[in-house]
Image (cartoon, rainbow, N blue to C red):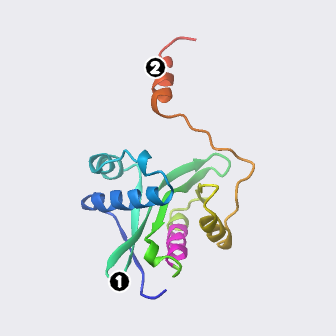
Amino acid sequence: MDSKLSFRTAESSDVSLILKFIRELADYEHMLDEVVADEQTLKTWIFDKEKAEVIFAVADGREIGFALFFHNFSTFLGRAGIYLEDLYIMPEYRGRGYGKAMLSKLASIAVERGCGRLEWWCLDWNKPSIDFYLSQGAKAMSDWTVYRISGSRLKEMAENSLIEV
């Protein structure tokens, strides 16, 4: 690392920076048009409802990346884990060990909290990230497929839950 890295926990006054990093990550992933989050929504869900946490990587006196994560639960382990939703390091700071340091920080948080694992998804085409994760000892969960219900279908299903079977 070129400069000393530190971490800080995000505060509600950081929502604009969180949204900036989310948009930069989405742009990198060619998914910017899918970002509908806004500052108020992030403030509500991250800080008011406390459904996720954010830590920033700080170098050269500025935030150079972030990780957004939350707890999940493994019935097999009988304990919580940490699910990493997003990890982002600004392009000009990549390749300096900051991503590795961020993952190590998240692992430290997981261990401190007694969690059984740290996990995340990665886009299949994102070879640089996949190579990085594998180099850190991560294992691809090749026997599992991610399924998702969202948008109008999610609403339809919710409405159907009111129907007696």
Mark 2 burial class by Cα count in 10 Å: few <14, some 14-19, many 20+: few
Disc 1 marks which amino acid?
Asp
Q: Report the magenta residues as a range.
A: 98-108
Disc 2 marks which amino acid?
Glu
Question: Quick check: 14 left or right of 119?
Answer: left
For the C terminus, which image quadrant?
Answer: top right
Q: Which mark is residue 159?
A: 2
Q: Which mark is residue 60?
A: 1
| Residue in the image at 47% along x and 51% along y | 31
Residue 68 visible at all: no
Residue 107 in which image quadrant:
bottom right
Residue 3 in which image quadrant:
bottom left
Compared to 160, does 131 lie above or below? below
Q: Secondary structure at mark 1?
A: loop
Residue 6 visible at all: yes
Q: Of helix, strand and loop, which mostly describes the magenta segment?
A: helix
Q: Secondary structure at mark 2?
A: helix
Q: Position of residue 133 (x, y in %)?
A: 63, 67
Q: Is residue 49 magenta?
A: no
Question: Quick check: 56 left or right of 77?
Answer: left
Compared to 59, does 154 lie above or below? above
Most foreground residue, 57 or 81: 57
